[in-house]
Amino acid sequence: MTATELPASLIRTLPGSAYTDPQIFALEQEKIFETMWFCAVRTSELDAPGRFRTVQVGRESVLVTRTREGSVKAFLNICRHRGARLCTQEEGEVKRAFQCPYHAWTYGLDGKLVAAPNLTSMPDVDRTTYGLVGVHVREWLGYVWVCLADEPPSFEEDVMGAATERLGDPKAIDHYQADELAVGRRIRYDVRANWKLVVENFMECYHCATIHPELTDMLPEFKGGFAAQYYVGHGAEFADEAEGFTVDGSAGVARIPGVTEEQDRRYYAITVKPQVFVNLVPDHVIVLRMIPLAADHTVVECDWLFLKDVVDSGADLDRSVELFHRVNTQDFEACERCQPAMDSRAYAQGGVLVPSEHHIGAFHEWVTAKLRD
């Protein structure tokens, strides 16, 4: 066996430069995040006309809002006059229109140019042509998904298909009624690590027995090193003594009515490439959305979704939230521990994946293929 050959039980990861090189990250922004469906905001955040939120998608700032007619629209957050950032706040509300703070070009909630200084003296300026640049929009699981591509890929295949591929049944995720749930808690994590390290970490459980004592107490099979995502249609079973998916195994809150008996007392995890993780348990859904900002910087927003009646009642959600908050903190600390070593000469050719991690190799092949397209 030569120095570059590996034993059959190991396969090679991406090289270290894939996690540190700004040029590779820029290519990922262009070829992945700006061409695929990107989960942007929770639909309930746009609860009235004029409510808006901005989100970074690849190299673009995207403005998502609700029109007076009730539809959701998304636009590049750029004034068509001189390119000023239209909305500098991450979220807010306007009454009737968005006005550029530079020269006061003003756009309706539908993106149409409605006013500008001396606009009436420029009758040849078409108000639709010089309106905001629109972005494709879909809604699923109670979130607004956007796509910057001129011709977006199939939402049904790329996004909804990821849930079917993992759960083995296209209707399985519908039982959790995610679009009807309410945000009981949101935590934003500032992770000083490459986005791919976060994805790889979420996809495997070889590390679970080492850094996730609370999770392996809840899901004992994870001590064996195989993540739920290693299998199709498999949900990790709760420990016999656990009453609910909580930090101490105590009872959680009201079960989501659509959850089947087969899905009860089980945990399912789904990766929707390139930036979403969905976690399903009987009484709540946990959705993590990554926003990659640099080769070594990723923001992760995590929502804990419960029945609206449970949230409105003021029920104590702390024990339910704390379990996965600890898991998140442990995971992101591990990713940040790896990031500095990606530049090491010892990692120039990458690391290795053991058999329980071999499915991560398919993710690496997918990334490599996307960058070649």
Image (cartoon, rainbow, N blue to C red):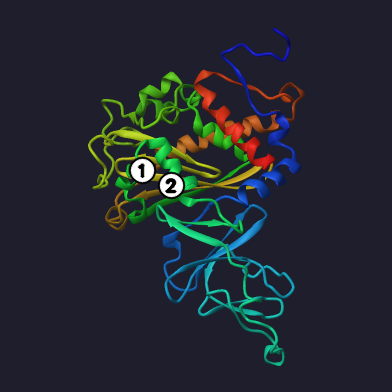
In the rendered image, residue 141, in percent from the top left (x then y), is placed at 40, 52
Measured along the vertical axis of the image, is residue 103 above or below residue 256?
below
Counting the numbered discs, the total is: 2
Q: Residue at x 26, y 38 (%)?
A: 251
**What's the amino acid at mark 1?**
Pro
**What's the amino acid at mark 2?**
Met
Q: Which residue is mark 2?
A: 160
Q: Is residue 294 left or right of residue 169?
A: right
Q: Is residue 82 left or right of residue 368?
A: right
User: In the structure shown, which secondary structural element does the residue marked by tag 2 occupy?
Assistant: helix
Q: Which mark is residue 170?
A: 1
Q: Where, quadrant-wise, is the C terminus in this rendering?
A: top right
Name the image quarter holding residue 350.
top right
- Mark 1 and mark 2 in contact (Cβ < 8 Å)? yes
Label 1: how many residues lie within 10 Å, few (<14), some (14-19) or many (20+)? some
Q: Is any atom of residue 251 visible in this view? A: yes
Q: Is any atom of residue 296 visible in this view? A: no
Q: Nearer the viewer, residue 111 or 338?
A: 111
